[in-house]
Image (cartoon, grey):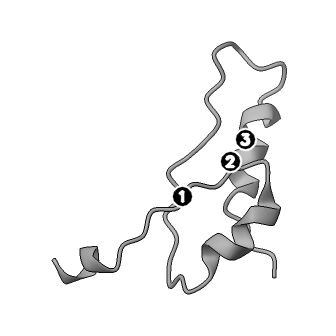
Amino acid sequence: MEALKSLKVVHCDLNSPDKWQDAMKGCDAILHVASPFPLGIPKHEDDVIMPARNGVLFKS
């Protein structure tokens, strides 16, 4: 497939949004497939939800 020739996979830490600017340069789209996965039950659901949600917010 032609689209696969330009596919670039980038790893970014959901808790380090300062790294996302460089990773997003030249992107036409983003597919968010990562979320925190704790080994135990989190103290609060936001410990999992907020990093996943914030990981897809783009701030210029």
Task: Give the residue at mark 3.
Answer: 49
In the picture, measured across the screen, residue 18 lies left or right of residue 30, that is right
Which of the 4 image quadrants contains residue 37?
Answer: top right
Q: Nearer the viewer, mark 3 or mark 1?
A: 1
Q: Position of residue 18 (x, y in %)?
A: 82, 64
**Which of the two residues, 12 or 29, is positioned nearer the viewer here?**
12
In the rendered view, would you say 41 is above or below 44? above
Q: Are marks 1 and 2 in contact (CB under 8 Å)?
A: yes
Q: Are marks 3 and 2 in contact (CB under 8 Å)?
A: yes
Label 2 secondary element: helix
Query: Looking at the rendered structure, which numbered label has been put on residue 32?
Result: 1
Task: Give the residue at mark 2.
Answer: 52
Q: Position of residue 21 (x, y in %)?
A: 73, 74
In the picture, measured across the screen, residue 33 lies left or right of residue 7, that is right
N-terminal of the pair, mark 1 or mark 2, is 1
Q: In the rendered view of the protein, which quadrant contains the N terminus?
A: bottom left
Which of the 4 image quadrants contains residue 5?
Answer: bottom left
In the rendered view, would you say 59 is above or below 49? below
**Which of the two residues, 54 or 3, is positioned nearer the viewer here?**
3
Amino acid found under the numbered disc labelled 1: His
